Amino acid sequence: MTRTIERQTKLNSFEKFKAEKDGLAVKTEIENFAKIGWEAIDKTDRNHRLKWLGVFFRPVTPGKFMLRMRMPNGILTSKQMGVLAEIVQRYGNDGSADITTRQNLQLRGIAIEDIPDIFNKFEKAGLTSVQSGMDNVRNITGSPVAGIDANELYDTRELVKQVQDMITGNNKGNSEFTNLPRKFNIAIAGCRDNSVHAEINDIAFIPAYKNEKFGFNILVGGFFSAKRCEAAIPLNAWVEPSQVLTLCRVILEVYRDYGLRENRQKSRLMWLIDEWGLEEFRSKVEGQMGITLETEALKDEIIWEKRDHIGIYKQKQLGLNYVGLNIPVGRFYAADMFDLARLAEVYGNGEIRLTVEQNVIIPNIPDSRLETFLTEPLLEKFSIDPQSLTRAIVSCTGSQFCNFALIETKNRALAIAKELETELSMPKPVRIHWTGCPNSCGQPQVAEIGLMGTKVRKNGKMVDAVNLYMGGKVGKDAQLGSCIQKSIPCEDLKPILRNLLIENFAAQPK
Ligand code: SRM
Ligand code: SF4
């Protein structure tokens, strides 16, 4: 494991602090941190190592931490949602939760004093936030309608769970994978519309048949960063579902042991693939797996446009439906969370699902309960038939809570969408993604219209602005969009978007 570290003489400051003490080590210090309070915690422990437990110090709101969960395949139970709602409720007006672009949940406003108690609650409820930040594998995404989609090719739920359990040591924390050179993303697609944005992950599994046998083509190295954005490239390999776990383990080991650790801007998996060449990377993986990987299937099964799952859909189980609710910009509060848990319990089987578009799906609602379900007041707030722009907004956290942010995103995204909706009728949803800085957490490169926060000087004053991206395509033939106009002051943005929507997306002035 230390081979790369020995090879490289100049380590960046993150590598140094990780070598001094592994991030996961703070697990045993949590009680003490809770006792001494956030101001007295060693700064490296507080600002960095705590992220190995999913506890994020927020310099924008010091003392109010963010908790990033893990939600394998984006699935949780109503009981778990209830536990999370109780936690958020304690923080009153300051407590909220966000659905993330990785089918996951983040809780806000958390006091460090409460973390030991919260972790106990998590353990009892089968929840975890372990290894969800910094140089760890992020939430593993899978098809949001796995197991209920009449057209699915593979139910990804079990595989996603197995991969998470392997990486996190069954949620207890696994120091084998807590010192990667950088963050790492894994996605497993089991349906025809690539509903996980496979192409922007470090490892992606794409459904593909070989000699009539089901398996996955493998993509590697996809990532976004402030310095460089790349779609994942084919490894020219195909695996059966039973090989997914081992392949993930081995690629992670290769990345951990040989990944570049000198410059954090050049540490993601693709930089190692660049340095070695794809062939050498592939042979190293094969060597460590002890097999020759089969070459990729000639065609994959991603042949549909991406679905957003908002609305009512028949399940593969006769007489059951899943209903997708639009949670504008992914933000909700304790009362909403309790209510969602109740709806899932009363009408469904207690299951709740999250999507990478920051929305919620309630599955398993019988035909006979649907009509009453549709009269629930929560559906006025979280519509199953929202207007075309609100329906498809995705937004990162932005300056309200994120100290990297150059602009406010969520509130602004929603306000502009609402204004445009009063002025225009749109024949179909337009996917607008907002991201507060070049880190691209809001994935502007996959959007039809992507907006990336920046600053610009206007009339001698620095003002909030965006770089405009277009051309992102998701689902079949996914491709990344590119920046077509830089530094548009946010105050001048609305008429520009209005024109774009009219000219490129057939919007009509009302
Ligand atoms: Fe992200 C860092 C939020 C998805 C690329 N991201 C951050 C931090 C942790 C920075 C910080 O400490 O403040 C943000 C926390 C803000 C907060 O308080 O919420 C943050 N990222 C998010 C979330 C919450 C955005 C959202 O509103 O949904 C997403 C959480 C996903 C999850 O559940 O784990 C989130 N981040 C992404 C994605 C999208 C994806 O995975 O599909 C990307 C681009 C894809 C990728 O990683 O290749 C992304 N985040 C980054 C980067 C740039 C990484 C790089 O290689 O340079 C950073 C900065 C870093 O790691 O140094 C970053
Ligand atoms: Fe923060 Fe930038 Fe990520 Fe938005 S894109 S959450 S502003 S790091």
Image (tube, helix red, strand yellow):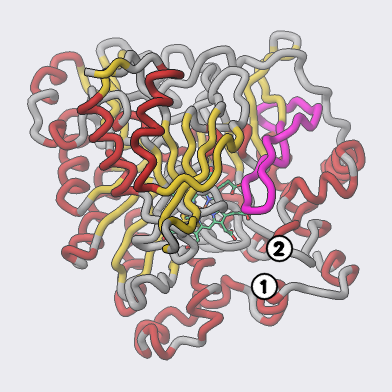
Q: How far from the left and from the top, in percent, is residue 384?
A: 23, 25
Count of marks overlaid on the render = 2
Mark 1–mark 2 CB contact (< 8 Å): yes
Question: Which residue has dot 2 on it?
Answer: 264
Which residue in the rendered view is the most extreme toward the front?
459
Q: Please, is residue 196 above or below residue 501 in the view?
A: below
Q: Which residue is mark 1?
A: 14
The numbered mark at residue 436 is none
Badge 1 element: helix
- For the record, the magenta segment spans 219-243
Q: Is residue 87 above or below residue 395?
A: below
Q: Nearer the viewer, residue 425 or 233?
A: 425
Above or below for 59 versus 408 = below
The answer for how far apart the CA atoms under marks 1 and 2 are is: 8 Å
Q: Can you say which quadrant of the picture contains the C terminus?
A: top left
> Residue at image x 64%, y 65%?
175
Q: Secondary structure at mark 2?
A: helix
Report if the beta carbon of the residue with label 2 is closer than 8 angstroms to ligand 1: yes
What residue sits 19% from the left and 54% below the top?
A: 334
Q: Is residue 214 left or right of residue 451?
A: right
Residue at horizontal 80 percent and vertical 59 percent from the top = 260
Q: Is residue 233 magenta?
A: yes
Q: Position of residue 379 (x, y in %)?
A: 15, 31
